[in-house]
Each structure stands twice: as structure tokens, then as C-alpha cells.
Image: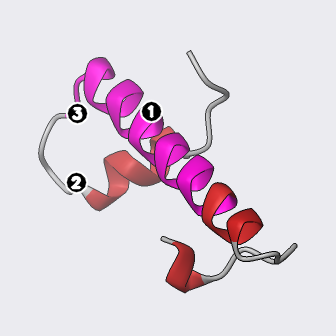
């Protein structure tokens, strides 16, 4: 499993009064990690060392 990039407490807070299963947080973290990795790849492919919003 990739390093935790999200804050569980903030995810729970954003979900309000809904319960949040542990697997939801794990899958959400995996998806965030995938987005970050794709953005890094895109920035490198465009010869940049800065990751920008358009890379997402």
C-alpha cells in the first residue's frame, strides 16, 4: 500500500454524519496516489520540474 497521502480525520469530517469504512479511506488514498504519479509523469514528459494543476 502506498504512503498515506490523505488525512483520515479530514475525510471523515468531509463526509459529515455518514460513517466512513476503512476500505474507503484506503481506496481513496490509492486513487490520490495514482493521480499524483500521473501528474508527475506528465510534468516530466513536458520537460518541467514543476507539477501544475493542468497535469491532473
Q: Which residue is mark 2?
A: 15
Q: Which stretch appears magenta? A: 20-40
Q: Which mark is residue 11?
A: none
SS class, disc 3: loop
Q: Residues within 10 Å of mark 1 (few under 14, many from 20)?
A: some
Q: Which residue is mark 1?
A: 30
SS class, disc 2: loop
Of the pair 26 and 17, the residue shown nearer to us: 26
Q: Residue at x 38, y 49 (%)?
A: 11
56 is higher (above) or lower (below) than 23 = below
Residue 22, horizontal then vertical, whole percent: 32, 20
Distance in Å between CA atoms under marks 1 and 3: 16 Å
- Marks 3,2: beta carbons within 8 A: yes
Residue 45, horizontal then vertical, whole percent: 70, 66
* Main secondary structure of the magenta stretch: helix
Residue 41, horizontal then vertical, whole percent: 65, 56
- Marks 1,3: beta carbons within 8 A: no
Q: Which mark is residue 20?
A: 3
Distance in Å between CA atoms under marks 3 and 2: 7 Å
Q: Earlier in the sequence, mark 1 or mark 3?
A: 3
Amino acid at each position: 500500500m502506498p504512503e498515506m497521502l490523505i488525512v483520515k480525520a479530514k475525510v471523515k469530517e468531509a463526509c459529515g454524519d455518514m460513517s466512513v469504512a476503512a476500505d474507503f479511506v484506503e481506496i481513496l488514498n490509492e486513487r490520490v496516489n495514482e493521480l499524483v504519479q500521473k501528474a508527475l509523469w506528465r510534468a516530466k514528459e513536458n520537460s518541467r520540474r514543476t507539477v501544475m494543476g493542468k497535469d491532473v
